[in-house]
Image: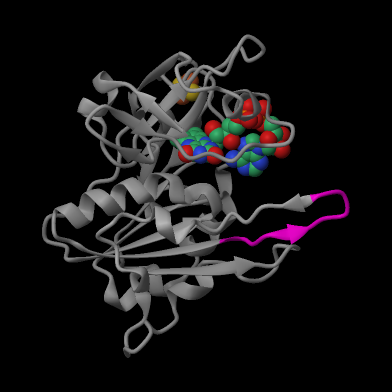
């Protein structure tokens, strides 16, 4: 969904998000990452939950309607200027902020590879479920299709995790994705981060992750999004959503 919001796009950086008002039945705005930008606005890319009042309402908006939106919010990803090879790792809809990062990094001449793990299309008992794998035609124009690899997780969620790709060799090469990368940027569900935090191969690698926790205000007022880190309590909406993987006390985080 594209939003015309020149004031927001002027300041938007990859990894930041907006708080979106979702109609008269939702008291609280919902946090959604900035997915793309152009000179006039930003695009959002979101899952429409069957029982999600907010995303259901958003999905019914028509061109020309006005949506109450605050942003850009949060800290965003920080690329080290000494890095050359950036690996982006998405779990499901976590691809949303990473596509914006990929486009920005490619325009600044970094080399980018992106991995996504998500559920594929399948027929459940009652109705078909659309694939959550990102359509290749929506990748940034400069992104070589070979630089984007996906893995489909099984419907029971027991195999096909994107973390399995991290230690695999890059096609046609001898290095793994982790070895190739100078830095890793990730967005996905909590179990994915817990797995990554336990991977010995990532121990000495700089990894930034974007945390998706429940938010009420999104503005640093209510403390509803507080998480424990090695440097004390942090508010995801204000101090994050991007944190270093090794700073968060993962066993204490509840999403
Ligand atoms: C910083 C940040 C950025 C985000 N960016 C995006 C984004 O770009 N795109 C996007 O799709 N989402 C994003 N989210 C998650 C999004 O804010 C929530 O999914 C949102 O609450 C959905 O609103 P809703 O009213 O539709 O559902 P709610 O009423 O909030 O939830 C209803 C039900 O939907 C399901 N549900 C909702 N969210 C999740 C979830 N994250 N994981 C599993 N089940 C869930 C649950 O079954 C829940 O009971 C982001 C969250 C944060 C904190
Ligand atoms: S959501 Fe209210 S302080 Fe972060």
Location of residue 109 with respect to 239 vertically, above or below = below
- Give the quarter of the figure containing the C terminus: top right
The colour mode here is: one colour
> Where does the magenta region start and end?
118-127
Q: Which residue shows up at 34% across the image and 70% down it?
A: 147
- Place of residue 106 in the rendered image (x, y in percent of width and height, measured from the top left): 21, 57
Q: Nearer the viewer, residue 233 or 89?
A: 89
Residue 190 in the magenta stretch? The answer is no
- Place of residue 251 in the rendered image (x, y in percent of width and height, measured from the top left): 57, 50
Q: Which residue shows up at 55% across the image and 54% down it?
A: 92
Q: Nearer the viewer, residue 170 or 75?
A: 170
The mark total stands at 0
Q: Can you name the residue that lies furthest to the front here?
A: 63
Location of residue 76 with respect to 226 vertically, above or below = below
230 displayed left or right of 86? right
- Place of residue 10 in the rendered image (x, y in percent of width and height, measured from the top left): 20, 26
Q: Nearer the viewer, residue 75 or 139?
A: 139
Location of residue 61 with respect to 66 vertically, above or below = below
Residue 123 in the magenta stretch? The answer is yes
Q: Which residue shows up at 82% across the image and 55% down it?
A: 124
Location of residue 104 with respect to 174 vertically, above or below = above
Residue 168 seen in this snapshot = yes
Q: Which residue shows up at 76% across the image and 53% down it?
A: 128
209 displayed left or right of 254? left
Residue 255 seen in this snapshot = no
Q: Quadrant of residue 102?
A: bottom left
- Place of residue 234 in the rendered image (x, y in percent of width and height, measured from the top left): 41, 32
């Amino acid at each position: 969904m594209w939003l015309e919001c020149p004031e927001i796009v002027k300041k938007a950086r990859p990894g930041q998000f907006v708080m979106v008002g979702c109609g008269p039945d939702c008291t609280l705005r919902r946090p959604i990452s900035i997915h793309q930008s152009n000179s006039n606005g930003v695009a959002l890319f979101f899952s429409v939950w069957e029982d999600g009042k907010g995303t259901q309402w958003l999905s019914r908006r028509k061109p020309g309607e006005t949506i109450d939106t605050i942003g850009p919010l949060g800290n965003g990803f920080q690329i080290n200027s000494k890095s050359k090879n950036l690996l982006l790792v998405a779990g499901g809809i976590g691809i949303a902020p990473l596509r914006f990062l990929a486009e920005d990094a490619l325009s600044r001449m970094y080399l980018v590879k992106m991995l996504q793990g998500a559920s594929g299309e399948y027929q459940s008992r009652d109705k078909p479920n659309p694939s959550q794998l990102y359509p290749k035609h929506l990748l940034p124009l400069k992104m070589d299709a070979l630089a984007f690899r996906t893995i489909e997780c099984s419907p029971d969620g027991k195999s096909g995790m994107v973390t399995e790709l991290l230690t695999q060799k890059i096609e046609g090469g001898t290095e793994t994705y982790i070895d190739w990368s100078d830095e890793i940027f990730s967005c996905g569900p909590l179990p994915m981060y817990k797995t990554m935090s336990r991977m010995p191969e990532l121990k000495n690698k700089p990894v930034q992750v974007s945390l998706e926790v429940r938010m009420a205000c999104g503005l640093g007022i209510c403390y509803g999004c507080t998480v424990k880190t090695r440097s004390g309590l942090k508010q995801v909406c204000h101090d994050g959503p991007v944190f270093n993987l090794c700073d968060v006390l993962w066993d204490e985080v509840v999403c």
